[in-house]
C-alpha cells in the first residue's frame, strides 16, 4: 500500500468549520491511483472535525494553564512544544498535577 502525501491549503476552515485565524490546513493521505478530487470526496469530514476539536481543546488548555503555572512557579515563562497533540496532553497533565500539589 503506497501513499502519496498531499498538503492542501484549500479553505480548510470551511471544510472543518474552525476559525481561519488558526492557520489550519488539511492533510490528505491517499492512494496514488486516486486523484485529489476523488480523495477529497471520500474524506470523512465529521471525523476530521472531531479530531480538530480535540486538538484545539488541548491547545486551549495549554494556553489557559501556562500563565497560571508560570505565576505559581515564579518564573518568567513556561514553554510547551505544541507541535504534537501528545506534547500538549503531557503538558496539561503535568500542569494539572503541579497545580493540584500547591
Image (cartoon, helix red, strand yellow):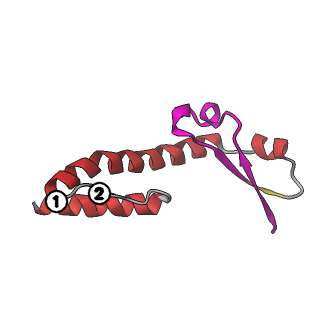
Residue that appears at 37% across and 44% down: 60
Residue at the far left in the pictured view: 102
Q: Quadrant of residue 1?
A: bottom right
Residue that appears at 25% across and 59% down: 95
Q: Would you name the residue on which mark 2 appears?
A: 78
Query: Along the line of sight, which residue is nearer the eye, 4 or 79?
Result: 79
Residue at the far front in the pictured view: 76
Residue 24 at x, y = what percent? Answer: 58, 42
Q: Is residue 20 magenta?
A: yes
Q: Is residue 19 magenta?
A: yes
In the displayed structure, 62 sits above or below 49; it is below
Q: Which quarter of the image is occupied by the C terminus?
A: bottom left
Asked which secondary structure carries label 2, the reply is loop
Query: Along the line of sight, which residue is nearer the eye, 37 or 20?
Result: 20
Q: Quadrant of residue 98?
A: bottom left
Residue at the far bottom in the pictured view: 1
Question: Range of the magenta residues?
Answer: 1-28
Asked which secondary structure carries label 1, the reply is helix
Q: Could you say which disc has been placed on residue 73 in the image?
A: 1
Amino acid at each position: 500500500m503506497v501513499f502519496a502525501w498531499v498538503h492542501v491549503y484549500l479553505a480548510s476552515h470551511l471544510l472543518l468549520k474552525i476559525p481561519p485565524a488558526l492557520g489550519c490546513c488539511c492533510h490528505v493521505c491517499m492512494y496514488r491511483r486516486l486523484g485529489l478530487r476523488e480523495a477529497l470526496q471520500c474524506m470523512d469530514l465529521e471525523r476530521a472535525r472531531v479530531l480538530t476539536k480535540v486538538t484545539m481543546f488541548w491547545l486551549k488548555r495549554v494556553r489557559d494553564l501556562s500563565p497560571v503555572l508560570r505565576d505559581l512557579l515564579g518564573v518568567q515563562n513556561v514553554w510547551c512544544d505544541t507541535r504534537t497533540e501528545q506534547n500538549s496532553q503531557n503538558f496539561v497533565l503535568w500542569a494539572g498535577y503541579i497545580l493540584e500539589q500547591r
